[in-house]
Each structure stands twice: as C-alpha cells, then as structure tokens.
Image (cartoon, helix red, strand yellow):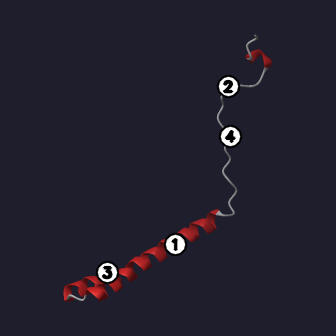
Amino acid sequence: MAKNIKRMVNKVGDGDFAAAEVAFDAAVGARREAQIANYKTVIAQNSFQPPETNPGTDTGITGHPDEVKGE
C-alpha cells in the first residue's frame, strides 16, 4: 500500500492526475482487501467456538406462590 501512496503523490507532483487516480484506487483496493482478509480470519477463528455462557440476570422472582399477592 505504501508504494501505491508514494506513486500517487509522485504522479500528483508530476501533474499526471489520471495516473494518480489509478494509484489511489490501487491503494484503496489494497486496503480493502487487507481488511476483508483480516475479517475472514476472525470469522474463521470464531465460527466453531462454543458460545459464551450467559447465566442471565437474577430478578429475584422465583415463581413461588407466596410471592403473588392475593386478590
């Protein structure tokens, strides 16, 4: 990616904006591909992991009949 940015800056300095656009697109594409590859790695590592247990929230309600007020 650094080569693409350097190439883009050099092309802008030379006044060749069309080539600078191509270099910019290449730099953005390389960055995008790197992010996608990283995301795929993370997904692959986490795909077959068992889910974390969630004990839930204790509300203090047990369902015992004494908890319900009579009418």
Residues at marks 4 and 2 touching, judged by CB atoms closer than 8 Å: no
SS for callout 3: helix
Q: Earlier in the sequence, mark 2 or mark 3?
A: 3
Of marks 4 and 1, the one in the foreground: 1
Q: Amino acid at mark 3?
A: Ile
Q: Amino acid at mark 4?
A: Pro
Which residue has dot 3 on it?
Answer: 5
Which residue has dot 1 on it?
Answer: 36
Q: Earlier in the sequence, mark 1 or mark 2?
A: 1
Residues at marks 4 and 3 touching, judged by CB atoms closer than 8 Å: no
Cα distance between the residues tagged 4 and 3: 50 Å
Near mark 4 (Cα within 10 A), the count class, few <14, some 14-19 or many ≥20, is few
Quick check: can you spot residue 1?
Answer: no
Q: Residue at x 48, y 77 (%)?
A: 33
x, y percentage for residue 50? 70, 56
Which residue has dot 4 on it?
Answer: 55
Q: Earlier in the sequence, mark 4 or mark 1?
A: 1
Which residue has dot 2 on it?
Answer: 60
